[in-house]
């Protein structure tokens, strides 16, 4: 949703050479200020370019990365708006993820005094503003698109008839009445009815010809019948594309399902689907397509047997992975989505956990919690405690203290049952930190003592260094500064001796 908008605003060059892209992006940011150029690595996920952290951004924790990225994008938009008015159009906002919603709110508020127009398209919702939380922002105005009245429906119908049958088309009044009545104000349904009639070779001037047709009685059946009218090859290509998503590229679909033929042959199949008005060109340079309506994509997808859907989702995941480590890191959410709907249980677990960890690092706490909670039943007992610990930390950040405590205690019991002493000790340490943040100092001290005893028994100096650091923080918060200093110094000695390995205990 956002990536294309930001690449356009930043004028990121469409070049296969990512080195050139990085240099150009940094140069453009430097034109705003030196500080903006130093924060350029934060834009990696936004514009889809690999940007390694520098000394500044490397030190940012998840929360600071999120707030700093939002601030950077606001500054970029302000600088761009200074050169002239901007309109940013975002479609399908009912599917917006929590991080993007937070960013959208920040940008809308920051731009209330700038020549910037945000146009958001979303499905109707019970709450004003589609439930995006923007209805109280300055200059907010919602346009509800209801059913077409008879006059507007007639205009849409006439335009569609002229498109398909020519400007001089003559239409029987009976056909006009039938189409408008059946469509019930739904413009997509109306257009699909005309597409169907045209596809059947009916003369619109013949008042009886269309009545001889067995016209499907619902929109979904109508779209399905139009897909079925395609030859087998373009129909199969369309179904494979529906698994990829509402937008898709010819080379990508070919990579997922080479049985469709060469890249050029696959492209020709989509040209036929375009001629049938089921897809539209998205970007010519990428051979990218867009399902004309989400209903068309859903119908094509639902027509696939469950077993075939799972196979195709696994193939999409495998093809994404074939792009190499960088492509995998950029597409963790997509990989998690496709493998989750596939049959490969190992991949399903792996990428749900990895996507959860990535979401946690982005401070996308709701997404991270969802990933971890969904994958937990699939994780083996000897690995589940680590996932529970991560879930507990996310629940803390969301303010779910009781749920976080229960999750840590579950991790303790589980690691005890599988005799994983190190994981048990870390869960005690995590629980201690959670209790400290709630002001339950004595409970926290007891948990740290248990963690320290286990780490000492198993000779885990890295874990012991972590516990000493946490004990120092607990003592400092209670005003016991001498004890805090001693604990910090002992922790520092261990960490200096172990180097970076000490950080692995965190």
Image (cartoon, rainbow, N blue to C red):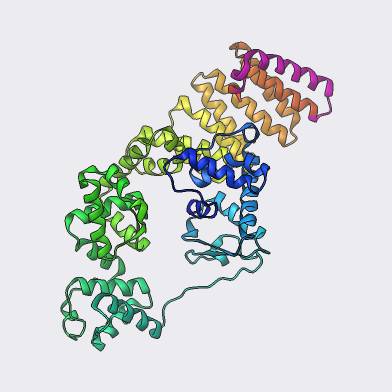
**Horizontal and vertical percent position of residue 163:** 29, 75
| Residue that appears at 26% across and 56% down | 270
Residue 345 belongs to magenta span: no
User: Where 173 sits versus 88, above or below?
Assistant: below
- Is residue 400 rendered to the left or right of residue 312? right
**Horizontal and vertical percent position of residue 143:** 53, 73
Can residue 378 be seen by looking at this rendering?
no
- Is residue 69 rendered to the left or right of residue 6? right
Q: Nearer the viewer, residue 469 or 429?
A: 469
| Residue that appears at 46% across and 36% down | 329
**Horizontal and vertical percent position of residue 321:** 37, 36
**Horizontal and vertical percent position of residue 237:** 25, 52
Q: Nearer the viewer, residue 37 or 495?
A: 37
Q: Quadrant of the C terminus?
A: top right
Within the image, what quadrant is residue 213 found in?
bottom left
- Is residue 94 rendered to the left or right of residue 107? left
| Residue that appears at 21% across and 50% down | 265
User: Where 19 sits versus 270, above or below?
Assistant: above
Can residue 322 be seen by looking at this rendering?
yes
Residue 493 belongs to magenta span: yes
The image shows a total of numbered marks equal to 0
- Is residue 228 rendered to the left or right of residue 446? left
User: Where 215 sits versus 310, above or below?
Assistant: below
Magenta residues?
A: 477-503
| Residue that appears at 68% across and 23% down | 448
Q: Dominant secondary structure of the magenta stretch?
A: helix
């Amino acid at each position: 949703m956002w990536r294309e908008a930001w690449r356009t605003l930043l004028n990121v060059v469409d070049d296969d050479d990512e080195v050139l892209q990085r240099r150009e992006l940094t140069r453009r940011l430097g034109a705003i200020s030196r500080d903006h150029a130093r924060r350029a690595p934060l834009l990696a996920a936004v514009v889809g370019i690999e940007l390694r952290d520098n000394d500044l951004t490397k030190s940012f924790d998840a929360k600071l990365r999120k707030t700093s990225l939002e601030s950077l994008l606001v500054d970029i938009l302000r600088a761009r708006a200074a050169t002239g008015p901007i309109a940013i159009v975002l479609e399908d906002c009912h599917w917006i993820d929590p991080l993007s919603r937070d960013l959208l709110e920040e940008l809308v508020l920051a731009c209330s005094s700038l020549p910037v127009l945000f146009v958001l398209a979303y499905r109707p919702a019970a709450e004003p503003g589609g439930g995006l939380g923007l209805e109280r922002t300055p200059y907010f105005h919602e346009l509800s698109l209801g059913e077409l009245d008879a006059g507007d429906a007639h205009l849409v119908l006439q335009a569609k008839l002229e498109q398909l049958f020519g400007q001089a088309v003559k239409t029987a009044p009976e056909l006009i009445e039938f189409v408008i009545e059946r469509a019930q104000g739904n413009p997509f349904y109306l257009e699909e009815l005309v597409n169907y009639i045209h596809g059947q070779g009916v003369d619109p001037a013949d008042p009886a010809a269309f009545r001889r047709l067995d016209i499907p009685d619902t929109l979904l059946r109508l779209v399905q019948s139009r897909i079925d009218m395609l030859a087998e090859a373009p129909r199969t290509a369309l179904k494979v594309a529906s698994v990829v998503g509402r937008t898709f590229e010819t080379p990508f679909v070919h990579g997922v399902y080479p049985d469709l033929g060469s890249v050029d042959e696959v492209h020709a199949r989509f040209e036929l689907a375009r001629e049938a008005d089921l897809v539209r060109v998205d970007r010519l340079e990428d051979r990218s397509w867009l399902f004309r309506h989400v209903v068309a994509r859903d119908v094509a997808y639902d027509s696939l047997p469950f077993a075939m859907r799972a196979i195709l989702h696994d193939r999409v995941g495998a093809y994404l992975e074939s792009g190499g480590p960088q492509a995998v890191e950029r597409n963790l959410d997509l990989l998690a989505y496709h493998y989750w709907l596939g049959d490969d249980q190992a991949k399903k677990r792996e990428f749900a956990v990895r996507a959860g960890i990535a979401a946690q690092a982005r401070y996308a706490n709701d997404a991270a919690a969802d990933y971890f909670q969904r994958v937990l039943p699939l994780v083996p007992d000897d690995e589940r405690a680590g996932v529970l610990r991560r879930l507990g930390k996310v629940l803390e950040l969301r303010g779910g203290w009781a749920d976080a405590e229960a999750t840590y205690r579950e991790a303790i019991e589980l690691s005890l049952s599988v005799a994983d002493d190190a994981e048990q000790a870390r869960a005690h340490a995590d629980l201690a930190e959670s209790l400290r943040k709630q002001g339950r100092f004595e409970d926290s001290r007891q948990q740290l003592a248990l963690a320290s005893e286990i780490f000492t028994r198993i000779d885990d100096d890295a874990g012991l260094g972590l516990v000493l650091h946490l004990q120092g923080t607990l003592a400092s918060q209670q005003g016991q500064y001498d004890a805090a200093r001693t604990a910090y110094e002992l922790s520092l000695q261990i960490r200096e001796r172990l180097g970076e390995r000490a950080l692995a205990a965190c």
